[in-house]
Image (cartoon, rainbow, N blue to C red):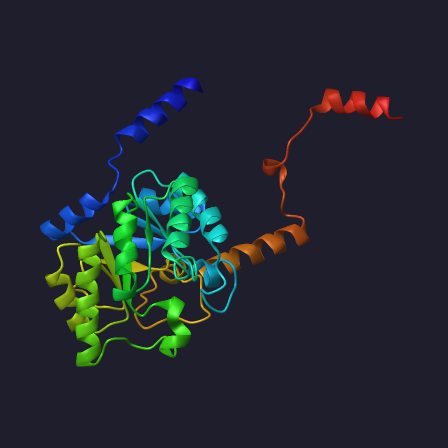
C-alpha cells in the first residue's frame, strides 16, 4: 500500500499542470482550449482524466446542483465547498472558481477578501468575474495581489434581470464596440482569459483576434480560442431547458433513469442482492452462532 501511494504521488508530480501561461501558448499555437463545469470530486476526476484543460466551478451550480431558478442565490460558502471537492479531483486541469453575485460588487475590499478566501481555502488556481469597465480596476488589484482572474463578457447571468433575460448580447454596433473595449480593458488589467457568452460569432472572432489572451466561447461561435459548456448539458443530464449553443454528446438522464428502474425492479423481485453481492460468515461459524443463540 505504501509503495502504491508513493507511486501515485510520483505520477501526480509528473503531470503537467495547465496554467495561464499554458493557455496563452495554446492560443499562440492555434490549439483549442476546452473548459467544462464541475461541482464535485467524482465529476472533476473523470473530466480531468479525460483531458479537459479547465474545470470551472461555475455559479451555474445554483441551477444544476442546488435547484435554484437562477445563479443569484449562490454564496461564497457554496463556491468554497464545491471548489474544494473539485480541486481534490483535478491533477492536470486548471481549476477556476466563479465569484458569485454580490461577492465582489459591494466594495473592492470585500471583493479582495472573498477572492483571497476562495484561493486560500479551496486550491483553486484563479477566479472568474463578470463585467467589463466597471470591474477593470478590481481585476488589476486582484492580479497585482497574485490572484489570477478570468473575465466574463456578453451574457452575464448575474445581471440577468438587468439584461432582461438570457437573450443574445452585443448584437448592435454600439454594444459590440463596448464589448471590444471592455475586453481590451480586462486584458490590460491583467486578466489571463475572457469568457464570451452568447454574442455574435463575428464579434467573438474580432475580439479573439484583438487580444493576446485566450477567449473561451459559449454560444459565441467557433472562432474563439476555446469552448466551455456546463457538463450536465453536454451529457444530457439537465433538461429543464437546453440552449441553442449546447450540443448533447450523450443522454445520461435516460441512462441513469433506466439503471435506477432496473435496480428498483431487482430489489422488489429479490434478484438483487444475489449471492455474488453478499458476504458469508461460513457454515462452521453459522452453526456455532445458532447454538449460541438457542
Instruction: Judge whether residue 254 can be spotted in this image.
Output: no
If the image is split into quadrants, where does the N terminus sit?
A: top left
Is residue 149 among the parts visible in the rendering? yes
Q: Position of residue 5 (x, y in %)?
A: 40, 23
At 26% from the left and 60% from the top, the residue drawn is 136
Location of residue 129 (image quadrant): bottom left
Estimate the x, y position of residue 133 in percent, counting from the top left. Answer: 25, 65
- Seen at 34% across and 68% down, the residue is 156
Which residue is rendered at x = 21% and y = 66% of the image? 182
How many labels, in total? Answer: 0
Q: Quadrant of the C terminus?
A: top right
Q: Position of residue 292 (x, y in %)?
A: 85, 22
Q: What residue do we see at 63% from left, 37% from top?
A: 275
Q: With 69 as the anchor, is 99 left or right in this view?
A: left
Q: Is residue 167 left or right of residue 33?
A: right
User: In the depicted view, which residue is nearer to us: 268 or 53?
Assistant: 53
In the displayed structure, 269 sits above or below 2; it is below
Amino acid at each position: 500500500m505504501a509503495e502504491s501511494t508513493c507511486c501515485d504521488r510520483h505520477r501526480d508530480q509528473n503531470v503537467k499542470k495547465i496554467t495561464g501561461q499554458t493557455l496563452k501558448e495554446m492560443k499562440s499555437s492555434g490549439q483549442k482550449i476546452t473548459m467544462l463545469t464541475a461541482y464535485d470530486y467524482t465529476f472533476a476526476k473523470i473530466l480531468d482524466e479525460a483531458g479537459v484543460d479547465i474545470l470551472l466551478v461555475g455559479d451555474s451550480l445554483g441551477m444544476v446542483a442546488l435547484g435554484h431558478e437562477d445563479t443569484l442565490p449562490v454564496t461564497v460558502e457554496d463556491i468554497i465547498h464545491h471548489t474544494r471537492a473539485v480541486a481534490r479531483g483535478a491533477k492536470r486541469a486548471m481549476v477556476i472558481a466563479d465569484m458569485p453575485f454580490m461577492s465582489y460588487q459591494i466594495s473592492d475590499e470585500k471583493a479582495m477578501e472573498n477572492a483571497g478566501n476562495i484561493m486560500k481555502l479551496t486550491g483553486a488556481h484563479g477566479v472568474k468575474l463578470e463585467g467589463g469597465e466597471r470591474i477593470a480596476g478590481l481585476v488589476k488589484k486582484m492580479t497585482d495581489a497574485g490572484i489570477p482572474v478570468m473575465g466574463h463578457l456578453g451574457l452575464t447571468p448575474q445581471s440577468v434581470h438587468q439584461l432582461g433575460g438570457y437573450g443574445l448580447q452585443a448584437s448592435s454596433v454600439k454594444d459590440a464596440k463596448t464589448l471590444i473595449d471592455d475586453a481590451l480593458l480586462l486584458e490590460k488589467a491583467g486578466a489571463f482569459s475572457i469568457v464570451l457568452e452568447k454574442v455574435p460569432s463575428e464579434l467573438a472572432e474580432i475580439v479573439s483576434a484583438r487580444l493576446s489572451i485566450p477567449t473561451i466561447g459559449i454560444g459565441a461561435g467557433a472562432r474563439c480560442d476555446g469552448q466551455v459548456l456546463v457538463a450536465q448539458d453536454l451529457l444530457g443530464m439537465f433538461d429543464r431547458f437546453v440552449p441553442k449553443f449546447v450540443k448533447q454528446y450523450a443522454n445520461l438522464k435516460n441512462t441513469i433513469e433506466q439503471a435506477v428502474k432496473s435496480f428498483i425492479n431487482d430489489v422488489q423481485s429479490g434478484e438483487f442482492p444475489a449471492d455474488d453481492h453478499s458476504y458469508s460468515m461460513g457454515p462452521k461459524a453459522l452453526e456455532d452462532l445458532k447454538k449460541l443463540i438457542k
